[in-house]
Amino acid sequence: MRPIALVTGASSGIGRSIAELLAKDGYDLILTARRLPLLEKAGQEIGHATGARCIPVQCDLSAVDGAKRLIDEVRARDLRVAYLVNNAGVTVEGKFLDHDWEDQRAFVQLMSTSPSELIHAFLPEMLAAKKGKILNIASLGAFWPCFPGITLYAGSKSFLVRLTHTLAVEYARSGVTFTVLCPFTTRTAFIDTPLSRGIVAKMPAFMIQSPEVVARIGLDAVKNKKVVAHTSLLNHSLAILLTTLPPRWITAGIERFMALGSK
């Protein structure tokens, strides 16, 4: 029997690329996202190409009960998750008060609370089996002291990095591995927004990676039992600079280069 991987945000981008690679590596898949037609299409194409069983489950993880609904659905089908990929994410562009609180709450729910809830639900089964893999998709933004224009983004990604670190320590030698991947600019719908387009236009092409490359780096990091993985030497170097230089210097550079917080 093939082990089962659960991938959130699996209808496109990094999530879909991860799902394709996991299917080729011998996993059956539970694929979840908000857009059911895209999700079903992804499942059909991956299943046809690899022979993997693909189970699409429409779910909005930004809803207060979104993660619980997904967990209940997995358990109702009597499925055991051996590999959990927390990938789903969005941006909420604008200053903090440009959006009502429900938008901001939903953002935190999707980016931080729901991943934690999914881990809390599926980790006990992995511990009992003495094997399992958890991959969280964060961002180089986790190491920025601020992210004006996407107010809660840096904090939510930093949360994932620290959560992964902590779990890796708490459950060391349990047979379960914990990895957080920190890509920078990836060619997905995530960067095709009014704010992001202007930023990306200023960046050299070599700094923009494909979702397929990012996905492979992430899965290789899991296989090698890395806790924190960066998608290039440049990104790793930037993470070091972002955590060692005085925050006021970094903030000044962010405001000048990205023109954030002013629009």
Image (spheres, helix red, strand yellow):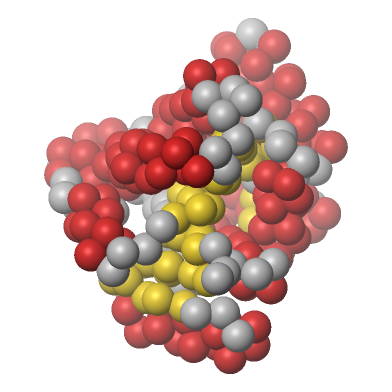
Tell me if residue 126 comes above or below residue 189 in the rendering.
above
Residue 65, position as x, y percentages in the image: 16, 50
Relative side of 70 to 262, left or right: left
Name the outermost residue toward the bottom: 48
Residue 235, position as x, y percentages in the image: 75, 37
Residue 134, position as x, y percentages in the image: 53, 43
Residue 257 visible in the picture: no
Residue 107: name its quadrant. Answer: top left
Count every numbered label the image shows and give the total: 0
Residue 74, position as x, y percentages in the image: 30, 62
Tell me if residue 242 comes above or below residue 147 in the rendering.
above
Q: Give the quarter of the figure containing the N terminus.
A: bottom right
Give the residue drawn at x 59%, y 23%.
Answer: 172
Residue 164 visible in the picture: yes
Q: Nearer the viewer, residue 257 or 183?
A: 183
Relative side of 219 to 73, left or right: right
Q: Nearer the viewer, residue 69 or 74?
A: 74
Residue 186: name its quadrant. Answer: bottom right
Residue 114: name its quadrant. Answer: top left
Q: Give the quarter of the figure containing the C terminus.
A: top left
Give the residue drawn at x 60%, y 35%.
Answer: 175
Give the residue drawn at x 31%, y 64%.
Answer: 78
Tell me if residue 117 comes above or below residue 251 in the rendering.
below
Give the residue drawn at x 41%, y 33%.
Answer: 156
Name the outermost residue toward the top: 246
